[in-house]
Amino acid sequence: MSVPDTKPVPDPESVPDPESVPDPESAPGTDRPNSVVPPVPRDPHDARDADPGLVRLLTPEGERRPDPTYDPYLADLTDADLYGLLRDMVIARRLDDEATALQRQGELGLWASLRGQEAAQVGSARALRDDDMVFPSYREHAVAWCRGVDPLDVLGLFRGVTHGGWDADKHGFQCYAIVVGSQALHATGYAMAVSREHAAGPAGTGSTGSTGSTGTSSSNGQSRNQDQDQDMSATLVYFGDGASSQGDVNEALNWAGVFAAPVVFFCQNNQWAISEPARRQSLAPIYRRASGFGIRGVQVDGNDVLATLAVTRWALDSARRGHPTLIEAVTYRMGAHTTADDPSRYRHAAELAHWGQRDPVARMTTYLRGCGLLDDAGAAALDAEADALAATVRSRCVRLPDPSPQSLFDHVYVDEPETLSAARDACLELELAPATLEPRKAN
């Protein structure tokens, strides 16, 4: 869909201070007795979810709001597409629940839950073209699902039997990034390479032609043609509010702006960087930082799958024209940071209840029921499909074989150096050598 570059976005300078939820320290219904170590002291502006500049197309009650700026990006959706968005979210949540159960039962070493962030991930993922590339962090399980990655390949990472077994080129989905924020640099470099290859054209002949009425000049001096730029693939990189404090992310934002890289930065602000609230990390909304790097910024309700889809489509179209964008998707992490975390030590039940009323799956379900696209039978069938898939994935997961120690040396280098070959041989000798050491005797 071709849209002028002058597409309006909320003016960050005109956005007043956002609304806030009641301070959980004084909210009724808290389950924190005074004798227990209290959560992190809260500021009344914490857990904000109603910035006046925020893009929202579905209210928490499931009512559709018209929006002349972003409605055109949803005009092509069919009833089947709308149902498909809910299906993706229901399946992603069910697989997430199953993975959490597998970890609790000792079948996975760790799990990073996505519960509560299904709309942010599904809406943005379904905005991608097949030729676009995704750079995830370690929580984008719903994005992996939408990009066709076998859930078993994701579970294998957390079971410790693989370093990532999917074809990144086939799925347009790179391996998970455990080093917080590092993927933002990878994505920007990848996007810059895409831009240069597109400018060079087939065999370096050049594809953009001379700069004319539709042409622009990128910061590296190469001419661009906006119509032909729509053929260029875009890059989408995910990170959290905590990662936005990392130097890697800020360097990537700056580099993308300077070189007009076709990349979209998608920050899932789930309100907590492990145990640190977003307010402790940044006093200003994250999306407002974009102007400091010379790029576009927009804040979207990350629990609204339609708004997320529309905004990400707009941002990807802009990125193809050399206008990188920072999207802040305001959402909430309903579960723990990982299964090694205890969120009851730092957040209140009142805050969880507040965000529970904004549940993304329930919101889309209500909307589809109101449109006559879902009834009780359809909802039951969808749940049954998700349960069956989860059971199959569980069965396959517990049967995953342990890898050979030799696999540790696979896929490290394209051309294996002698030092690695020597280490491989030494490992093999130890593996094949008979056990000659006697077990230690207890004192």
Image (cartoon, rainbow, N blue to C red):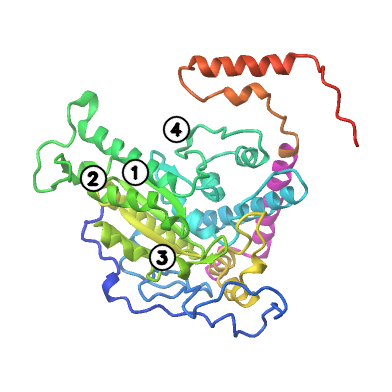
Whether residue 404 appears in this view of the structure is: yes
Contact between marks 1 and 2 (CB within 8 A): the answer is: no
User: Are the two marked residues, 3 and 2, in contact with CB atoms closer than 8 angstroms?
Assistant: no
Q: Nearer the viewer, residue 277 or 22?
A: 277
Answer whether labels 4 and 2 touch (C-beta < 8 Å).
Answer: no
In the rendered structure, which disc, 1 or 2, sits on the residue that comes first in sequence? 1
Residue type for callout 2: Phe
Q: Is residue 114 above or below residue 171?
A: below
Q: Is residue 316 magenta?
A: no
| Residue type indicated by callout 4 | Asp
Question: Is 234 in front, or is 182?
Answer: 182
Say left or right for 16 vs 275. Answer: left
In the image, what residue type sits under mark 3? Val
Q: Residues within 10 Å of mark 2 (few under 14, many from 20)?
A: some
What residue sits 8% from the left and 44% below the top? Answer: 212
**Which callout, 4 or 2, points at the residue further toward the start of the chain?**
4
Q: Which residues are magenta?
A: 370-396
Q: CA distance from mark 4 to mark 2?
A: 24 Å
Count of labels in the image: 4
Residue named by callout 4: 169
* N-term mark: 1 or 4: 4
User: Which residue is label 3 attached to?
Assistant: 300
